[in-house]
Image (tube, rainbow, N blue to C red):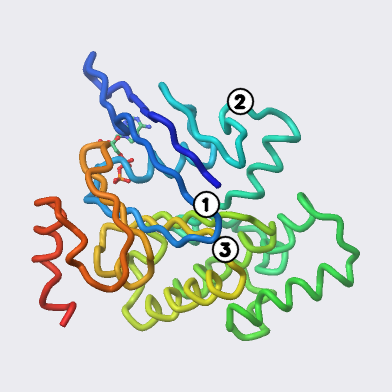
């Protein structure tokens, strides 16, 4: 379980003496095994929140608890273990992979860092992950720049899974992909969630993607969570005027 308590993050605005409250006193709990989407326009604080949730940023105030432990107070081995348990998958797949490494080495890295597997077990695990991701066998020896956008995304997901995480956080992970590839990746995430009971936190500026994926939708605006609803297929649950405006803008695509 992830518990976010009264969490805020302030940045110093460049070139001014102003402070900017990117995340503004946010509270919520993510239950194990849930699929939660966070929607908001660019600059609303989504990425900052994601980085706070996996300990890449330190809060200005408040706390993030993972299984009862304050993430920003973890040090040394505990911090390493935590990093492996909460995996962040970013929009820029290529930028997130070491250009010197082959796909095999990229996926092997978390296995070697966090798990003790024999060479044979490692190879079997990487083959299984690649098979689940459905790219052809020969991509194992390619490097990041030799992969398509969809393949890069699948490899990033495979690498995240190789660490055996409890939580996957996707930050605009399907933005920029063409619609068919995007649909494949979204269906893969749905499958992962259902089959592996993974806790998923999916950040997007597309409300339609959030509604397609998640059983809970949170809406963020100006650093605050302005709406937080369990979603069972009907958009009647949303009541905030801003969410209604977003719904209105995607109405032609919802059918
Ligand atoms: P989103 O992911 O919703 O697009 P971000 O979390 O990236 O929003 O950004 C929220 C606000 O915080 C924006 O105004 C952004 O410019 C600002 N911001 C984000 N990171 C930094 C930083 N490292 N330094 C200063 N301002 C930042």
Q: Position of residue 223 (x, y in %)?
A: 27, 36
Q: Residue at x 34, y 35 (%)?
A: 26
Q: Is 128 placed left or right of 223 in the picture? A: right
What residue is disc 1 on?
88
Q: Secondary structure at mark 2?
A: helix
- Give how far apart the Cα atoms at labels 1 and 3 are: 13 Å
- In depth, the one of 209 and 199 nearer the eye is 199
Q: Residue at x 62, y 86 (%)?
A: 136
What residue is disc 3 on?
198
Where, by quadrant of the figure, is residue 181 drawn?
bottom left
Q: Position of residue 188 (x, y in %)?
A: 50, 76
Q: Residues within 10 Å of mark 1 (few under 14, many from 20)?
A: many
Q: Is 146 placed left or right of 176 in the picture? A: right
Q: Position of residue 193 (x, y in %)?
A: 53, 69
Q: Position of residue 69 (x, y in %)?
A: 62, 33
Evaluate if marks 1 and 3 touch, with contact meaning CB atoms under 8 Å apart.
no
Q: Nearer the viewer, mark 3 or mark 2?
A: 3
- Give how far apart the Cα atoms at labels 3 and 2 are: 25 Å
Task: Work out which residue is located at the far top of the displayed protein and give it.
Answer: 17
Earlier residue among tags 2 and 1: 2
Q: Secondary structure at mark 3?
A: loop
- In depth, the one of 97 and 22 nearer the eye is 22
Q: Nearer the viewer, mark 2 or mark 1?
A: 2
Q: Where is 138 relative to 146, above or below?
A: below
Q: Residue at x 63, y 78 (%)?
A: 139
What residue is disc 2 on?
73
- Give how far apart the Cα atoms at labels 2 and 1 are: 19 Å
Q: Residue at x 73, y 78 (%)?
A: 127
Earlier residue among tags 3 and 2: 2
Q: Secondary structure at mark 1?
A: strand
Q: Where is 109 relative to 72, above or below?
A: below
């Amino acid at each position: 379980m992830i518990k976010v308590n009264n969490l805020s993050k302030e940045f110093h605005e460049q070139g001014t003496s102003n402070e900017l409250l990117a995340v503004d006193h946010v509270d919520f709990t993510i239950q194990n095994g849930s699929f939660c989407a966070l929607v908001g326009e660019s600059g609303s604080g989504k990425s900052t929140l994601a980085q706070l949730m996996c300990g890449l940023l330190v809060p200005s105030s408040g706390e993030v608890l993972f299984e009862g432990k304050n993430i920003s107070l973890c040090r040394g081995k505990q911090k390493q273990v935590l990093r492996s348990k909460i995996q962040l998958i970013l929009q820029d797949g290529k930028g997130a992979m070491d250009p010197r490494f082959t796909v095999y080495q990229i996926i092997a890295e978390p296995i070697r860092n966090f798990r003790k597997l024999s060479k044979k077990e490692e190879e079997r695990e990487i083959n299984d992950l690649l098979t689940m991701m459905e790219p052809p066998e020969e991509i194992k020896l390619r490097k990041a720049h030799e992969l398509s956008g969809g393949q890069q995304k699948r490899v990033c997901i495979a690498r995240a899974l190789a660490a055996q995480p409890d939580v996957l956080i996707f930050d605009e992970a399907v933005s920029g992909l063409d619609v068919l590839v995007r649909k494949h990746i979204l269906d893969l995430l749905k499958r992962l969630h259902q089959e592996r009971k993974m806790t998923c936190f999916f950040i997007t500026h597309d409300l339609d993607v959030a509604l397609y994926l998640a059983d809970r939708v949170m809406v963020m605006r100006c650093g605050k969570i302005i709406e937080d609803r369990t979603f069972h297929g009907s958009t009647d649950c949303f009541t905030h005027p801003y969410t209604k405006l977003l719904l209105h803008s995607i109405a032609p695509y919802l059918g």
